[in-house]
Amino acid sequence: MRSKRRVWATAAVATAAVAGVLVVQGVTGTPTTGEDPDAKSAPARADVRKSALKVSEDGDSASLRRRSTEPFSMLGVTWTDPAARVSGEVEARTRSAATGRWTGWLPLDTEIDGRTEAGRPGVRGTTEPRWVGPSNGVEVRVTAGDGTSAGLPEGLRLDTVDPGGSTSTAAEPAAYVAADTAPVEPSEEPAATGDPAQTPDTAPSPDPSVSDTTGPDPSVTTETAGTPSSDPDPGLTSPAPSQPPSVTAEPSATLPPAPPSTVPRPPVVPRAGWGADESLNNESPDYMSSVKAVFVHHTAQTNSYSCADSPAIVRGLLAFHVKSNGWKDLGYNFLVDKCGKIFEGRKGGVDRAVQGAHTYGFNRDTAGIAVIGMYTDTKAASAATASVARIAAWKLGQYGGDPAGTVPLTAGAAGNNYAGTKFTAGRKYSFQRISGHRDGFNTQCPGGRLYGQLSAVRGLAAGPVTGLAITSVTGASASGGTYYTTSDITVGWAASTPAAFITAYDLLVDGKSVATTKGGVTSARATLAAGSHQVQVRATHQSGRTSLSATATVVADRTPPAFPAGPSLSLRTGTVSTTAVPLTLKWKATDAASLKEVRLTAPTAKTYGPTTVSASHTAKSGVATAWRMTAYDRAGNAAAASVTGTPVILKESSAKKSGSWSTKSSSHYLGGKSYASSTKNAALTWTFTGRSVAWVVSRASTSGIAYVYVDGVKVATVDLKSSSTKYRDAIWTKSWSSSAKHTVKIVVAGTKGRPTVTTDGLVHLK
C-alpha cells in the first residue's frame, strides 16, 4: 500500500506569459489526491532503441529487415520533418518473446501530426505508437502512396520501447505466423510491397548469418531514461531529474488555487502510480487559464492487451512521446484503459489546466483524454466510456463547462478536420465540449465506433440519469399496474446511467420525498397511510439535473373484505344419491379497495376469482356439512365466513297419498322403490321444516306432467318427459331465505297419451 507520507517539493517560482500560457518555472506542491490506493511510487526506466530504415533507390519504399532485437513492447516509426506525412502504408511485424511466433503485418497509423507539440526543436514526424507486448524481433516496411510525387520523408527510423517494469506475456494476436526455430533476418532486403514468402500465412525465411543469440545491432541507438542520448536531435536529449511525480502545484501569488469542480472527481492513478520516469523531462508544465473542451482520442492501436499492462503502456507512450517524438512530456492529459482505470498523463497536477499535446491547432484551452485501444471497428467498453465521461465532466466542471454544450475555440494553426472543415489560425470555431480528435484534425481518431459513442459519453457526463424505472414493490401485490399493501413497502428501481454519475435517489410518495439514498443504493422503504398513493423515484445526476421514473400507484389497505350476506346453500337440479345431493353454494364478498379472491377451505378446497358468486357442489344426505370460505383482498387482508347445511331425503312412502299409486322396484330408485300413477289428480303430500326443497323423479319419453303446490299454492307445472331415461333426477327446486315449515304437494295432470308420473321422493335442506 502506498505510504500516506506527505511529499513536499520546494523551488523558486518564476512565471512568464508565453502565448497566453502560464509557464511555471518551479512549484511548491502537495501530493495529488484521489490517487489509486495501490499506486506504487518507484519509477520504471524505459529503453528506447532507434534503427534507421533503408530507403529504396527510387525513394518509394523503406524497410528494416527482419532481425532479433533487445526486448521491447511498443514501437513506432518517426522521421525528421514533423510536418511531413507518409501517405502510403507503414507496417511492422514482431516476434513474441514468449512464444517465438511472428505476427502478421500490423499497420501503424500515420494520421498523427508531429507538430502537435509545436514550437520545440527536434520534434519529429511520427506514426501512432503501437503496443505489441513483450517482443524480441521486428521487421518494418514503408511504402509511399500511389501518385505521391514527394516520396517518403527523410530520416525514417524505427523506435522500439521497452517500458521497464513488468508486463504480461500477452502479445499482439493479429494473424500470427508459425513459430521459427531460429527467427532471423531474410537473406535479401524485402521489396517495399512485401515478399510473398513473408505474408502472415508463412513463416519467415531463415538466414544463417543471423540467429536469436545475435547481440544488439551496433547500428541501433539505445536511450535509457536518465542516461545521455546519442540522438543528434536537440529535442531528444535526456534532461536532469525533475520534481517529485504527480505533484499538484500549491497556490501562490502567480498560480491561483485549483478551482473546485461542480462534480466529484473520479479516482485517478497518479504518475507515480504508473511508474512515470520524471527524469525524462525537467521542464515545468505550461498552465492555461481554463479548460473549455476535451478531445477524446484512441492510442496504442490494439485492444488485445491486459489491463494489468496498462501502466506499462502509459510508460511506453511517455517514453515514445518524449524520446521519439521530441515532445516535452506525454501528450495526453489523461488516459483511460478498457477496464475504466484513469491515468494521469502530462504532469502539472490533474486539477490544473495543464496544456497538453494532443490535437494539433487546438491544444489551447482543451484537455486530451486518450482511450487505450483501437476503436475504428470495435466499440469501446462501457467501463472505458463511463470513465471518459467522469473525467471529462470533472475537468469541465472546474470551469463551469456543460459537457453537453458547445464552445468556441480559437485555432492555433491552419488545417482541416476529418469532415473537411478548414481552419484558419486565429479564427474561432464551435466545438462540442466533448469532441473527438477528428473534429479538430484530419484523422479517424478516436475511431469511428468510439466517435459514435461520444453522444452517449456527453449524456453520461451531463445528465440527467436515463433509464430510470421502478422494478419492484416488495411487500405489495400487483394487479393491473396497481400495487396493494397492508403495511410498509420496499421500492426497488434501476437506471441505465452508472451509479458513479448519480448523486442521490429520492423515493417520492405523492410528490414528497420520504427516503433518500446514495447513488449506489437502489431501494428504500416507505410507510404509507391508508389510501391510494402515487409513488415515484427521483434521480439526481452529479450535474444537478434530475429525472423521474414513471409513477406507480400503490394502495395501502388495512380493512379486510366483507361478506355482506354471508354464504348460503340451496338444493339444485341434478342426479341425487345418498352420498351426493346436488347443492349450490352462493356468496357475496366485497372489499373497499380491490377483492382478489375467495377460497373455499372446507369441506373441499377451491379458489374463486373476485367476480364469482356461486358454485355447484354435492353433499352427503343426513350429514351436517360446514362450508367455510375466506375472502382476500389485493393487499392481503382476509375475512372468513361459513354456512352449515344438512340434506334430508324424504322417501315417497313418507308422503300422504290420494288417488291411485303403484309401487315400482329397481336398483335405480332411491331405496330401491318408487311410486307411479297415471290417475288424474292423484297426489302426494310431504310436510317438512327446511330452507330448500327438491322433487326427485324418474323420467322417460312417455312420462307425463304434474302440478306442484307449495303451502297450498300452485307454483309450477313440471313436464317429466325426457328423450333419455333418467333416474333420481331432481327436476324442480325451491328455496327460502330461512328455514321454516312447508308443505309440498304433487298432483298428476293425467296428460293424454303419457299420463304416468313416477316419483322417487323429496329432498329438503335443513
Image (spheres, grey):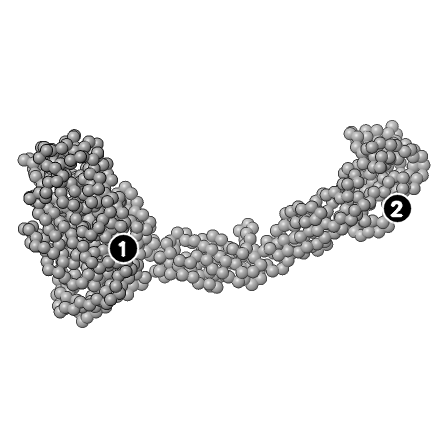
At a point 49% along the width and 60% down the height, the residue shown is: 525
Q: Nearer the viewer, residue 278 or 382?
A: 278
In the rendered image, the quadrant that contains the N terminus is bottom left
Judge from the rendering whether residue 741 lies leftward or rightward of residue 530; answer left or right.
Answer: right
**Residue 190 visible in the picture:** no
Mark 2 residue element = strand
Q: Are marks 2 and 1 in contact (CB under 8 Å)?
A: no
Q: Amino acid at mark 2?
A: Thr
Q: Residue at x 72, y 43 (%)?
A: 617
Under mark 1, the amino acid is: Ile
Name the disc covering residue 342, or none: 1
Name which residue lies at 30% across and 54% down.
387
Q: Position of residue 752 (x, y in %)?
A: 88, 30
The residue at 11%/33% (across/down) is: 207
The residue carrying pointer 1 sits among few (fewer than 14), some (14 to 19) or many (20 or more) residues within 10 Å by Cα, namely many
Q: Depth check: give the residue in front, 98 or 664.
A: 98
Disc 1 secondary structure class: strand
> Which percent across, then down, holds residue 735?
79, 47
- What residue would you read off at disc 2? 687
Question: For the residues carrying marks 2 and 1, which lies nearer the camera in this image?
Answer: 1
759 vs 431, left or right, is right
Residues 684 and 219: in front is: 219
